[in-house]
Image (cartoon, rainbow, N blue to C red):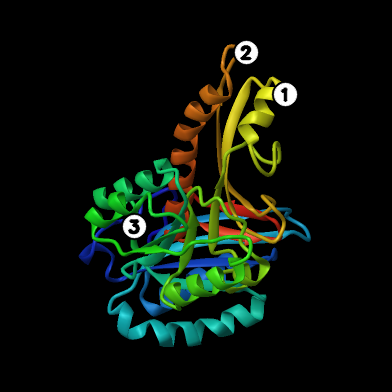
Amino acid sequence: MNQASNTAPLRGGDTTINRARMLISCPDQPGIVAAVSQFLFEYGANIVQSDQYTMDPEGGMFFIRIEFDLPDLSARVEQLKHDFSKVADHFRLDWSLSLAAQKKRIAIFVSKEDHCLLELLWHWRAGDLNADIAMVISNHHDMRSLVEPFGIPYHYIPVTADTKKDAEQRQLEVVGDNVDAIILARYMQIVSPAFIEHFANRIINIHHSFLPAFVGGKPYAQAHNRGVKIIGATAHYVTEELDGGPIIEQDVQRVSHRDNVEDLKRIGRHIERIVLARAVSWHVEDRIIVHNNKTVVFN
């Protein structure tokens, strides 16, 4: 059985037909890697990528991401899950297994700004975003003309302070049970705890600041008033704490005293696009494990 690190995953239809991804987190202890590897070997699987991380060799948590190929995977996956549960019980593993050939379905929520939405659409059309965009939902009509030429359904669901609860219920009805993740691509509404509960660690937001700095509204104005020399953007999972969920990805760019608020917004839009696209790509490729309010990202 071959093992290798940092091997780029194969993309496309036939090349991933027998490939699976396994994410594992558990209390660190000897024998975990040996037991998982031996199990896959006995099943006839070939490990093509393995990445692991230990928080603390004694008393900490252990995380591992494994990609493997298994002949006739689709016909054998349920039995594999059943048999692996014995290993999982012994080591107290929190684990998941997904098939690379089954693309995750995402719904994109957007308001009036198009840059993050367009970045995701471009990545998707180029084949660089290994997911299916099931729909775009917006509280405005503005993005319809951008989305519909891609052949993606566009749903206009207006939101006001008085109709927010009904609007979220309508959103849940439209999304249904066939969406794996929701992407807030500059969707300028705070989602309720009841909505978040339906998609725990499956709602990704882009915040236009380098969190934890400048939480909340108008972060570029806050940054300008503070006279910062670096601005950034943060992609994170949404929790009930405003802009306080587990951080997935961040990036920054230098600015100067000559830049006004509009300059910061213009520079920031580029950072936001790149950061969100990375985070979404890592999520749909099963590269993220959430632990408490942090993430382990195998990229």
Q: Find residue 261 and name its label.
A: none
Q: Amino acid at mark 3?
A: Asn
Whether residue 1 is visible: no
Q: Counting other residues with Cα less than 10 Å from the Cα at mark 2, is it few (<14), some (14-19), or many (20 or more)?
A: few
**Which of the two discs, 1 and 2, labels the residue nearer the N terminus?**
1
Q: Earlier in the sequence, mark 3 or mark 1?
A: 3
Q: Which residue is mark 2?
A: 257
Q: Nearer the viewer, residue 208 or 171?
A: 171
Callout 2 amino acid:
His
Which residue is at the far top?
A: 258
On the image, numbered disc 1 is attached to which residue? 226
Secondary structure beneath disc 1? helix
- The residue closer to the viewer here, 187 or 254, is 187
Q: Is residue 183 above or below residue 72?
A: above
Is 221 situated left or right of 123 in this image?
A: right
Element on which disc 2 rests: loop
Q: Determine which of the numbered discs, if any, sits on residue 130 in the image.
A: 3
In this view, the residue farthest toward the right is: 59
Quick check: marks 3 and 1 in contact, CB under 8 Å? no
